[in-house]
Image (cartoon, helix red, strand yellow):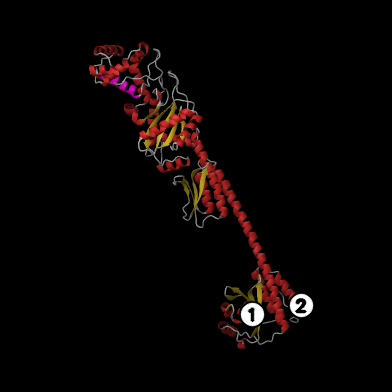
Amino acid sequence: MAGRSGSHGDTRLFAEACLWVQEAETPAEVLRRANEAARLLLGTSCSYLAVREGAVLRLAAHSGFRNPETARRWLLPVGQGIGGRVVERGETLVVRDYRHDPRRERFSKSLIDAEGLRCSIAAPIRSGGEVVGVLYAAEHRLRRFSAAEVELHTLFARFVSAALTAAEARQALHRRLTGCEEVERRRAELRRLETEVAALLARESGLEAALGVVAGRLAATTFVRDRAGRTIARVGESEGEETLFPLDAGGRRLGLLGVARTPAPDEDERACLERVAHLVTVWLLRSQDLLHGEQGPGSRFLDDLLHGRLGDEDAVVRQAAMLGIDLGVARAVLRVGLCPTGRTRSEPPFVTREAAEVLRQVADRRGLEPVVDLRGRDAVLLIRAEVADTAGLRALTSGVLRDAGARLGGARLAAGLGRICRRLGDYAESHREAALALDVARASPEGGVRTHEELGFYGLVARAVDPGMLDALAERTLRPLLQADVRHHTRYVPTLAAYLRANRRLKPAAAALHVHVNTLRYRLARIERLLGTDLEDVDGRFLLELAVRLLEARGGAIGPPADPSPLPRREAGSPGAGGGAPVQVASSS
């Protein structure tokens, strides 16, 4: 504001001073202009403006000090000295001569004397109804301020108070608007984060990439844990307070999404993370649904697991958890199939997806936490094995087959149960055992569940030789006897089995068959002629004993042909295929 000549009561000068202060944009600028205008209005050699900071007053603006130390060292407690009393009482005070004024505070006295100030007018500055500062117009020489000058300074201080209140209101409004803009900008960023996470999760293996976006945008470590609390994916290295968001679907907990950061996420970030958790939940459900897809990652994962094509074990466990498979608990492989209808050699029916879902529901109700997949004609279930032995698990799975068969309209189901898997490498062997055991169970008249422990000799040999080759060997070796037993209702196969089981002793074998020794001799002679072999020949006898044992172990799965035409053979390498009409092999009793 430019000064001008004239009396101190010049109305125009006062108006210009007020207008100049009013045009200030910020509270700090209001105070600076008020300090300059006060000096010009009263024509004093010095002016200064102090603001309250708690229990003290500090200079916010000054003009005309001769001593550089004055502004730097000026400090006044509220309630003491001239300015302290102005703040406390809220009224204007006049100092006619600092050197003789008893109201001065001891510290400021030496400072004012060093500056050489002699007199001043101190008026209160208010904001929001409270005294927030003091505006001084001071003189380095003795001067008698008139009543008009004191009133002018007081009125100007009141106008400054109004201008300061308005500037503070504008500044507060600006902060609120800026804050709202910042909040909206932040929310827009969080919405973009959600969109990017959704796009990444749409890809087949986008979980870690999606977590990486969250970790980068929120400057936090982001992780997903399965329902057992194991970390299946983690991005970031920062430490801090963990904030967890449940991954729930249909009343079932799939796991947790978490972030680790100090400070914890604010309200908007938590809302965003809740929506991200929903996206991750959908991704997990989709991944688990793909277990039933022929080409999906879940189906490929199970295929690798059941055939022993494994890599890093920790990575396998994490991938399994993403698919909803808890490999941290003991499990076993159960292979379930439908039995052939009638006594023909037709292939068994396929297990449909609807039937597999029934199996899953029944097994789940029994606490087996099944993971179900379709393999060929059968359903393969990875079931939880909390029981200590296979016998207890066999009882549970027998109940599953019984209940599922009833729900499927009385369907006759058979199942093979592999060993309990304590480590990842056990799954391939458990699956192989389950397939062999199912083959044996399906050929038995009663169906039901067979375990790997019941495979005995057959299971031992089948681990080293393809089961199709074993079946073909037994079939080829015993074919003449099997055909004769079908055509003429003879009992050559049971006779040969009893004879070999009795270590070629006639009397025990005849007793086991409930026939006379001479009858047994006659049958053995016929067997030798049909087979074209000598039962005293060690090599020939070994082959016969192997074929009979294979036939017995398979429960008569290699049934006699209905006609002399060649027997249909199941395809090599397919232990779960085929199966014909069962034939009982006589036991030793």
Say whether residue 551 is magenta.
yes
Q: Which quarter of the rendered picture does the N terminus lie within?
A: bottom right
In percent of the image, x 53 and y 50: which residue is there? 214
Say whether residue 405 is magenta.
no
In percent of the image, x 24 and y 17: which residue is there? 537
Q: Which mark is residue 11?
A: 2
Camera-nearest residue between 168 and 92:
92
Residue density around tag 2, few if under 14, some if 14–19, many if 20 or more, within 10 Å: few
Secondary structure, mark 1, is: loop
Give residue 225's position: percent from left, percent from top.
Answer: 47, 46
Question: Tag 2 or tag 1, which sits nearer the N-term?
Answer: 2
Give residue 572's position: percent from left, percent from top.
Answer: 40, 24
Camera-nearest residue between 398 and 246:
398
Secondary structure, mark 2, is: helix
Residue density around tag 1, few if under 14, some if 14–19, many if 20 or more, within 10 Å: some
Q: Which mark is residue 64?
A: 1
Q: Please report the bounds of the magenta region as a residue range.
A: 539-553
Quadrant of res 317: top left
In the shown orientation, is residue 32 left or right of residue 465?
right
Residue 430 seen in the figure: no
Quadrant of res 314: top left
Query: Which mark is in front, 1 or 2?
Result: 2
Quadrant of res 482: top left
Give the dominant element type of the magenta stretch: helix, strand or loop: helix
Give residue 9's position: percent from left, percent from top.
Answer: 75, 80
